Amino acid sequence: MAKAPPADKRRQILDAAVAVFARQGFHATRVSDIADEAGVAYGLVYHYFRSKDDVLNELFVERWSLLLAAIEEADRAGGPHRERLAAVATFIVDSYRYDPELMKVIIVEVTRAANSFGQTHLVEIRRAYESIAKIVADGQESGAFRNDVAPLFASMTFYGAVEQLLSGWIFNVIPTSDAGYDEAKDLLVTTICDGLEPR
Amino acid sequence: MAKAPPADKRRQILDAAVAVFARQGFHATRVSDIADEAGVAYGLVYHYFRSKDDVLNELFVERWSLLLAAIEEADRAGGPHRERLAAVATFIVDSYRYDPELMKVIIVEVTRAANSFGQTHLVEIRRAYESIAKIVADGQESGAFRNDVAPLFASMTFYGAVEQLLSGWIFNVIPTSDAGYDEAKDLLVTTICDGLEPR
DNA sequence: CATCCTTGATTGACCAGTCAATCGGTCCTT
DNA sequence: AAGGACCGATTGACTGGTCAATCAAGGATG
């Protein structure tokens, strides 16, 4: 029993941070807000994290590495290339369905905050684009996709569409329903993949 | 000789703000940075604008109203629906080509900053989505587009793809060349529209 | 009793916005 | 045409408040 008993205050702080960041945005949250939400003293945040930024970084890296693994796994699994892209979309949509607050924070505060944290994590973000591009490139080689579209380019289009979809849900531009998630995802994959297929 | 001499300090401040916001991001720029860039005293910014936020708002509203007008004009002009969407994409891409700094600021600090300024301007942003959706809906009615995709949904996909494209240019994820702008735009429109057409 | 966890008051930097003072042009008045 | 009253434009020092980060001391735990 090395660690468990202390109720894992570190995790508690991370979870609280997700809730507060999602509610108020990163810039508008004070470190004391995180501490309050976690039911913990102000200073403890600095025992576990070097800075406020570090808390957000941790949240991002944790989740983004899962996304990268999922994309690479979808590719490695083989099968029709359209299905591989569908698997990627499914993973992202399900991530949102399972933990909307965390995805909101990651998209709004990192992925789309390309001036601040997006800059810091540009390398990891770019890797996602490139992994998706690889799926497209493979699909072109096998004749599943037309080859007059640059893979990285198609990848950006695909990812951009997915992210915009999540943004629509996050900010209530698009209504959400549980059935809607899968339907929306299918529609999106169909549209984009039809556009990518040879005529 | 009524006016000319004052060199329009207001405009000067707005232009300086674009440069500084693009370089450092809204949060990281001090009001004094804007004043310095404009070659103007600190306090003058507050003579022309109520607050730092107000400066950004002005920049956004000025440019976004042009975008809304362009979308509605593209629709009103008639012609194949695919061409109407192409006109929208062209306007946005050209806006970037003509004034990349301003578009960077608008996308990064407003459109994608949905927690801060995006919230404030959600209504105007949404109107753009809806105007694009109207083009799609018309296209469906005329049989140009498949009708199993909700128009607002297709609109989000389309806009998301365009914005991601600009983001790629802005942050050097995608290389840029002058020929590349038009080619990229054509490819994007082709891909999305092919995906939207009946099979 | 040694080590790590936990506390919250305190420090110090930073910055948006205020305001009182100056400047310089315009147009009366004589 | 000279004097001067008026007024918006312009200046930048200053203030008030906010917050991230530190730290020294108090508690568990083994």
Image (tube, coloured by chain):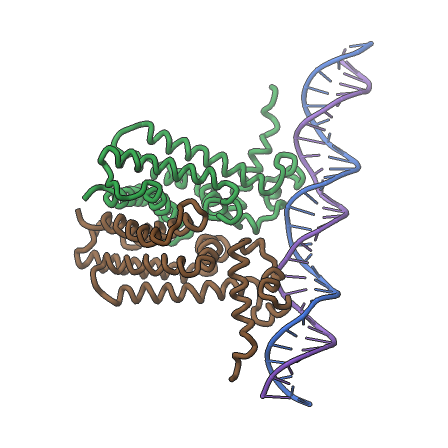
Chain colours: A brown, B green, C blue, D purple
> Is residue A195 among the parts visible in the rendering?
yes
Q: Position of residue A15 (x, y in %)?
A: 51, 65
Residue A63 image-quadrant placement: bottom left
Q: Position of residue D24 (x, y in %)?
A: 73, 75
Residue C22 image-quadrant placement: top right
A141, A166: nearer the viewer:
A166
Q: Position of residue D1 (x, y in %)?
A: 75, 13
> Which residue sits at x=46%, y=60%?
A102
> Which residue sits at x=62%, y=45%?
B31
> Which residue sits at x=32%, y=35%?
B135
The relative height of residue C7 versus residue A132 in the rendered view (above or below) is below
> Is residue A153 among the parts visible in the rendering?
no
Residue A30 image-quadrant placement: bottom right
Q: Position of residue A179 (x, y in %)?
A: 34, 53
What is the total number of numbered labels drawn onto the structure image? 0
The relative height of residue A106 versus residue A13 in the rendered view (above or below) is above
B48 left or right of A73?
Answer: right
